[in-house]
Amino acid sequence: MTDLPTAADETPDYRRRCRESFARQPILATLKATLTVPEPGLAIVEIPHDPGLLQQTGFFHAGVAATIADSAGGFAALSLLPPGSEVLAAEFKINYLAPGRGERLRATGRCIKAGRTLSICTVAVHALDGGREVHTAQMQQTVMRIAEPA
């Protein structure tokens, strides 16, 4: 089997490790993203509405949605990996279901299989607007475990 922890036996300091990794990513600071929930196998990344993140018709740009979805899946996987680990996207497929318009964009990542080298995640992206939540994109992702950079 695997020597990786499961959601039932949380990895030591996973919240701190996820938050520190998040803080080291300039793209997330540029997007004004927040990591609102790091739990074992679960991460939520949100960004506020900003005119600089929109495409020509006023919707959140698809690349912005993909960026926060990639991060949410990565942190969901990282939360289950042992100390000294980091992750990189190996592959993802994203389906856009509806235009993203609203006050915030939220990506909820869940790690559905944590492996020694590869982990599989699913990510739902929702646009939040005036109390409404619209499912705007769905991602299937494979992330690769690497050693944490020195």
Image (cartoon, grey):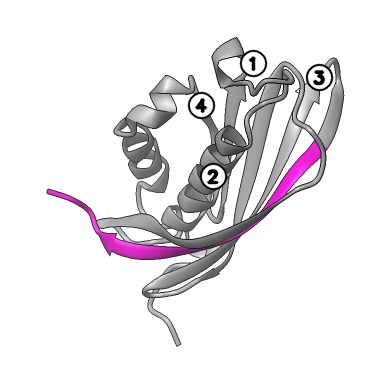
Given this view, does label 3 or label 4 mark the residue nearer the observer? 3
Q: Identify the residue at image location x=66%, y=26%.
A: 60
Task: Name the foreground residue: 26 vs 61.
Answer: 61
Q: Report the span colored magenta.
A: 135-150
Q: Which mark is residue 86?
A: none
Q: Amino acid at mark 3?
A: Asp
Q: Amino acid at mark 4?
A: Thr
Q: Which mark is residue 72?
A: 2
Q: Is residue 80 visible?
A: yes
Report the residue marked by disc 4. Answer: 34
In this view, 21 is above or below 47: below
- In terms of image quadrants, where is residue 113? bottom right
- Give the class, few, some or many, for how many residues have Cα within 10 Å of label 4's Cα (few <14, many ≥20): some
Pointers 3 and 1 in contact (C-beta within 8 Å): no
- In terms of image quadrants, where is residue 56? top right
Q: Identify the residue at image location x=43%, y=71%.
A: 118
Q: Alpha-carbon distance for marks 2 and 3?
A: 20 Å
Q: Residue furthest bottom?
A: 1
Q: Identify the residue at image location x=33%, y=40%.
A: 21
- Give the class, few, some or many, for how many residues have Cα within 10 Å of label 2's Cα (few <14, many ≥20): many
Q: Identify the residue at image location x=39%, y=42%.
A: 18
Q: Secondary structure at mark 3?
A: strand
Which of the marked residues, 2 or 1, is nearer the chain's N terminus? Answer: 1
Left or right for 5, reference 72:
left
Report the residue marked by disc 1. Answer: 49
- Give the class, few, some or many, for how many residues have Cα within 10 Å of label 3's Cα (few <14, many ≥20): some
Pointers 2 and 1 in contact (C-beta within 8 Å): no
Q: Which mark is residue 129?
A: 3
- In terms of image quadrants, where is residue 57? top right
